[in-house]
Amino acid sequence: MSGRKLRSILLSALLLTAGGLGLSAQTFGSYTPYSIFGIGDLATPGTAYNKSMGGVGIASRNHRFLNPLNPAAVTARDTLAFMADYSIIQDNKMFRQGDMRSASNTANIGDLMISFPIWRSSAMMVGIMPMSSTGYGYSYSFSDPALIGRTGNIDYSAKGQGSLYQLYAAAGVTFWRRLSLGAEFIYYFGKINKSFTESFSDASYNGASNGHILQLSAPAGKFGLQYEQPIGTKASLTVGATYRTAANIGGHTEHYRYSTGSAQPDTLYHSLGTPQGLRIASEQGIGLSFRYADKFQAEFDYTRSDWRSSGLDNAEGFTGNLAATGGKSVFTASVSESYRLGVEYIPNRNDIRYYWRKISYRAGAYWKNDYFLLDGNPVNSFGITLGATLPVFRWYNGITFGIDFGQRGSLKNNMIQERYINFSVGFNLFDIWFQKFAYD
């Protein structure tokens, strides 16, 4: 692929991403009732390559794909190559609570990143991907005969939408061909809108509309290391570790409550301010990867993030529309953990007769629990992933397809159960840019 063609593809991806970021302010980038709490539903980080292997990547060193999960992995690349990755994701969910059922379908960008060499065994990567999404909408009518007999029908509705994104720049260097170190600067930013409305059919009663507009930003850092130990002439074992710092949340908030209707409209409450004492939690991760030649890889990752001191469970606009009862908030920040396993198999990358033997096949599994409790109950997720990368053109260009089957929550304790099938499509771009020509 020529540099001109690659630049055209990258420009198209940038335009698509800009459109996607603008669209996310008007439509749902993700949809789940659980996103009413905190900063929303945390996105699974990584590219379609990472997602198709259960979300692993802390110990991955693959010179064919960009890996944003560990900044030390940026050096696993061809020293003359320019690399890029762009992906989109589609989220399909089915919800169940008691006898009630519903479904949703949403789409969002998965990532956009580029990587290039700096000097010898060092390289850099910049990109953007979702950090969290807020998307929910529900309504119900009060059914108490004693109440509606006096006031008429009363309807209640709630809606929330918005996203937080992470813009990042990472750099890494490799020492002695085995030890790689990396550092990354992260800037979280985005806007979340939450609104709640009560209305009366009897015009002599006023309804109420209240809500929260959260314009948030937060800087953070991430550090990573990877150590690769050869085993014989074809195999290797890699240990990886990451640490992401906590991030103090800044920005602007607006909270309001209006009396609506024909009886006596009025502003009941309006507050402008900045988030105080709120944090995005730090995260620690460790991974172990085994690779045999360019045919097989298996990896296991573990991550942990403690949100209990984030302050989100006591902050206006972050606890949904639920009031604290009995001295205990319905939404309680907790400890998030994840366990992930992924494998990759390529029959013969250099096969010249059978295309299917050049395809990279992947599978994975994961279990994780969210960063909050509901009425003291954990919200767990588990699933399996499948995927493949189809080679395109020459070198390492390809199209990656991934699918994620999973379940979140349960039917116990009046919770909502989510069953989902998520799709991801990634475009892996590779070109030799940084070479000196022998002749002019």
Image (cartoon, grey):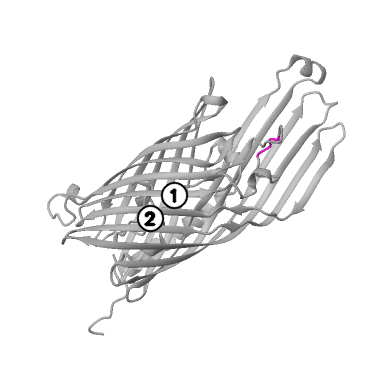
Q: In which quarter of the image is the N terminus?
A: bottom left
Whether residue 386 is situated above or below residue 15 in the rendered picture: above
Provide the residue designation for mark 1.
303
**Was residue 230 drawn as part of the magenta stretch in this picture?**
no
Q: Residue drawn 74% across and 46% down?
A: 255
Look at the numbered disc 1 and give the secondary structure of its residue. Answer: strand
Query: 20 left or right of 343?
Result: right
Query: 158 left or right of 27?
Result: right
Q: Quadrant of the C terminus?
A: bottom left
Quarter assignment of residue 260 = top right
Query: What residue type is disc 2 on?
Result: Ile
Q: Which residue lies furthest to the right in this view?
A: 264
Whether residue 38 is situated above or below residue 275 in the rendered picture: above
Do the CB atoms of the residues marked 2 and 1 lie less than 8 Å apart? yes
Instruction: Report x, y in % for residue 138.
Output: 62, 31
Q: Residue drawn 43% across and 44% down?
A: 338
Provide the residue designation for mark 2.
58
Q: Give the range drawn in magenta.
A: 320-324
Quarter assignment of residue 259 = top right
**Label 2: few (<14), some (14–19) or many (≥20) C-alpha neighbours in 10 Å:** many
Q: Residue drawn 40% across and 59% down?
A: 70
Query: 30 left or right of 297?
Result: right
In terms of depth relative to the viewer, which is nearer, 144 or 6? 144
**Label 1: few (<14), some (14–19) or many (≥20) C-alpha neighbours in 10 Å:** some
Answer whether residue 41 is visible to the viewer in this image.
yes
Q: Which of marks 2 and 1 is in front?
A: 1
Whether residue 18 is situated above or below residue 4 in the rendered picture: above
Q: Residue furthest left?
A: 353
